[in-house]
Image (cartoon, helix red, strand yellow):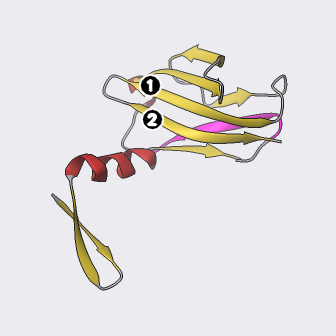
C-alpha cells in the first residue's frame, strides 16, 4: 500500500487506486476547454513511441476521431460543442481525459 497524507492524517491507499491517480497525470490536454484544436501532452512517464493510438469519443460512446500512434495536435473544428473523452492507449493502459469543446 502507498501512503497519502490528507490534512494531518496519513491514509493508506491500495496500490491500484494510487496508480489510477498517477496515470491520470501522465497525459494532459491543453487548452481545455477549447474550440478548434487541442494538444495531447505526455509526461516523462510515457514516451511517444509507446502510444498505440489517440482517440476522441462522444459521451454517447461514439468514436469521432482516431489516429494510430501519437499525434500531439488534434483539430476539432468540425465537432459540435460539448463534452468528449480523449483516450490515449499504450501497451499497458488506456488513459482517459475529459475534453470540453466550446
Indicate which disc residue 95 carries: 2
Relative horizontal placement of residue 98, taking residue 13 as reference (left or right): right
Closest to the observer: 84 or 42? 84
Outermost residue, bottom direction? 8
Q: CA distance from mark 1 to mark 2?
A: 6 Å
Relative horizontal placement of residue 89, taking residue 14 as reference (left or right): right
How far across and how far down the image is residue 14, in percent? 21, 54
- Residue that appears at 58% across and 32% down: 86
Residue 70 inside the magenta-drawn segment = no
How far across and how far down the image is residue 13, in percent? 23, 59
Q: Which residue is mark 1?
A: 89
Label 2: how many Cα within 10 Å (few below 14, some 14–19, many 20+) = some
How far across and how far down the image is residue 3, in percent? 21, 66
Outermost residue, left direction? 1
Relative horizontal placement of residue 26, taking residue 14 as reference (left or right): right
How far across and how far down the image is residue 61, in percent? 60, 22
Indicate which disc residue 57 carries: none
Magenta stretch: dominant SS?
strand
Say whether marks 1 and 2 touch (CB < 8 Å).
yes
- Residue that appears at 72% across and 42% down: 100
Secondary structure of residue under mark 1: strand
Question: Which residues are drawn in magenta?
Answer: 35-43
Q: Quadrant of the C terminus?
A: top right
Image quadrant where residue 55 sits: top right
Secondary structure of residue under mark 2: strand
Residue 36 inside the magenta-drawn segment = yes
Relative horizontal placement of residue 12, taking residue 24 as reference (left or right): left
Q: Is residue 98 above or below residue 56?
A: below
Image quadrant where residue 73 sits: top right
Closest to the observer: 52 or 102? 102
Image quadrant where residue 66 sits: top right
- Residue that appears at 24% across and 71% down: 11
Amino acid at each position: 500500500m502507498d501512503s497519502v497524507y490528507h490534512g494531518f492524517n496519513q491514509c493508506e491507499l491500495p496500490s491500484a487506486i494510487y496508480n489510477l491517480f498517477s496515470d491520470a497525470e501522465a497525459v494532459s490536454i491543453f487548452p481545455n476547454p477549447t474550440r478548434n484544436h487541442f494538444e495531447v501532452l505526455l509526461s516523462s512517464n510515457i514516451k511517444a513511441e509507446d502510444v498505440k493510438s489517440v482517440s476522441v469519443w462522444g459521451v454517447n460512446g461514439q468514436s469521432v476521431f482516431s489516429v494510430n500512434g501519437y499525434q500531439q495536435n488534434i483539430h476539432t473544428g468540425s465537432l459540435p460543442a460539448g463534452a468528449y473523452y480523449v483516450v490515449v492507449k499504450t501497451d499497458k493502459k488506456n488513459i482517459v481525459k475529459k475534453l470540453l469543446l466550446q
